[in-house]
Image (cartoon, rainbow, N blue to C red):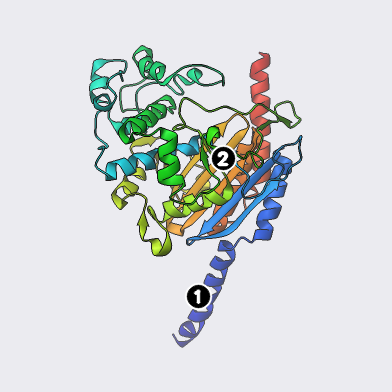
Amino acid sequence: MKKRITLLPVILFILLATNTAFAQITSEKIDLLMQDALTKFKVAGASIAIVKDGKVIHQKGYGVASVDTKKLVNENTNFQIASNSKAFTTAALSILVDEGKLKWTDKVKDHLAEFKMYNDYVTENFNIQDLLTHRSGLGLGVGDLMFFPDGSNFTIKDVMNSFQYFKPVSAFRTQFDYDNLLYIVAGELIARTSGMSYEAFVQTRIVDALQMSNTFVGSSLMKDKSNLATPHSSESETVKTIVPFGDQINGAAGGIFSNAADMAKWAIVRLNKGKYGADLKSTLFSIENHEEMWRIHTVEENHSHPRYNTHFMGYGLGWEIMDVKGNLKISHTGGLPGMLSLVELYPDQNLGIIILTNTESGGAGLFSAVANTISDSYLGLDDFGWTDKMVDWMKQDKNTGDDVTKK
């Protein structure tokens, strides 16, 4: 018994030392990880920010904003964050709910009289949260051709009038099918309720309030574009610049431009449950709405890697929600032509990872491999070699796709 007591402090020391070693991925290792990923995934440029316990522990740019100009990426280089804008939209609605101007269960038609879905029952019962949770019954990406590819002249009136003509693929509120058009409707709802445009409301009430000084809700608000990343494509095996995707009908589905430094501020506020400022005395949205945004509203099929022992996946309000090795994971990706982004938050670890890239399709491989490697270190997992594995998987996918195309 005495020997066991004597050895206990030694065992505890070893365990603590091991956990500390896992948890502390150094900036030097992140630099090597990012540079390796840029090369192997053929990505022109990227930036990353990591926040832990309310502080920024790493933020930096890598590669170039454009292969033509060779301008280097830094932590203030702006990228289109695409669908990571959706979390700003749900935060804006949370502010309006907190102010008593809306309720989550309000019927959309009571605020937007012209809104009409594919049958009377759905129209009568479609509430604000249904705009945000991809459970409308309509198919994946329905109506996206109204704003994608860039260059169409559809208006918000056209969008609001379109849903009655789409055919559902599932019963209302029974299946997850990702949707952008209904977020654009949510943006119009914000505009009519607040008396400001969607862009102006999010810019003033969220972006400016959080002192995200180089973030812009739409390109028209960005006067200085000298540090704006250019989108690229590597589909031809050579990384080439492509035409930037223009502003959409409104920015609610994917219209925000931001950077690693500003997105670090956003991540810290989200991990602080809406609190910000000196001594966290300011509140962006209530704890009740924080919980509402991070509650599963639509269940998704679990496709997680077995390494993470995931039991559930679902969609909240502008966020993906799942468990990873017993830890809650809140995340979202964003994608526009040549612009791919990732935001991952681990509330139990008080950890946030933001990665912004300017090249498709390699940007998705980069942000997945790098984020997985970093989060693994905090979760106490071994180095899985994510970069090389994902490079191989992407090659296999491309070969499969080429075979299908030839046939």
Q: Residue 130, percent across and down? A: 32, 30
The amino acid type found where label 2 is placed reads Ser
Q: Residue at 48% of width from left, 80% of height from top?
A: 8
The image shows residue 40, relative to residue 21, as above or below, that is: above
- Residue at which label 2 appears: 341
Q: Residue at 37% of width from left, 50% of height from top?
A: 284
The amino acid type found where label 1 is placed reads Leu
Q: N-terminal of the two: label 2 or label 1?
A: 1
Q: Residue 50, percent across and down? A: 56, 55
Tag on residue 101?
none
Q: The C terminus is located in which quarter?
A: top right
Q: Give SS at disc 1.
A: helix
Q: Is residue 278 visible?
A: yes
> In the picture provided, is 64 more to the left or to the right than 172?
right
Q: Residue at 76% of width from left, 34% of height from top?
A: 68
Q: Nearer the viewer, residue 120 or 101?
A: 101
- Residue at which label 1 appears: 12
> In the picture provided, is 129 more to the left or to the right than 337?
left
Q: Residue furthest bottom?
A: 2
**Residue at mark 2 to residue at mark 1: CA–CA distance:** 40 Å
The image shows residue 8, relative to residue 56, as above or below, that is: below
When asked about the image quadrant of residue 125, the answer is: top left
